[in-house]
Image (cartoon, helix red, strand yellow):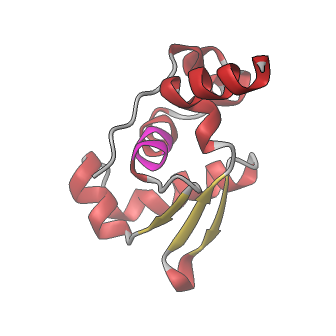
Amino acid sequence: MAYRSIDDSFWLSPKVRQLSTEAKLLYIYLISTASNAGIVRTIPEIIGTTTGIKTGRIGGGLEELRGLGRIFWQPEQNLIWVVGQIDHQTIAKGVLDFYKAK
């Protein structure tokens, strides 16, 4: 499992601030479990077990995130792409800033 660190500016983002509590938790889960490319392959039961969100409510949270353009979700393939996932990573920002400065 990869180490992930979430930049604290995450909470200041208008797109995050407008999310419901469950969608915020779901978004953090997705950011922290996605591959470096932002891909998560999972099913609602796994998300529910991990986060404590009731399985029946996960679809609504994913729809909320999809409606705001934060994810692309293909439920029939159990595939979620977290848009801009790397933008919320503390370590990634430092690396990107280093290379931008060169």
List x then y, in percent, for residue 74: 61, 75
Q: Is residue 35 above or below residue 95?
A: below
Residue, far bottom: 76
Task: Give the image location of residue 77, x and y in percent.
Answer: 53, 84
Q: Is residue 52 left or right of residue 40?
A: left
Residue at x 56%, y 65% (from the top left corner):
80
Q: Farthest residue in the front direction?
A: 102
In this view, 101 is above or below 55? above
Q: Magenta stretch containing residue 30, yes or no?
A: yes
The total number of labels drawn is 0
Position of residue 37 in the picture relative to residue 54 (left or right): right
Residue at 45% in and 38% down = 28
Q: Quadrant of the C terminus?
A: top right
Q: Is residue 66 above or below residue 51?
A: below
Q: Is residue 64 magenta?
A: no
The quadrant where residue 20 appears: top right
Q: Residue at x 68, y 43 (%)?
A: 84
**Residue 13 left/right relative to 22:** right
The magenta segment is: 27-32
Picture coordinates of residue 56 (x, y %)? 38, 64
Foreground residue among 87 and 79: 87
Q: Residue at x 53, y 73 (%)?
A: 79
Query: Magenta region, mostly helix, strand or loop?
Result: helix
**Nearer to me, 83 or 58:** 83
- Whether 88 is drawn above or below 2: the answer is above
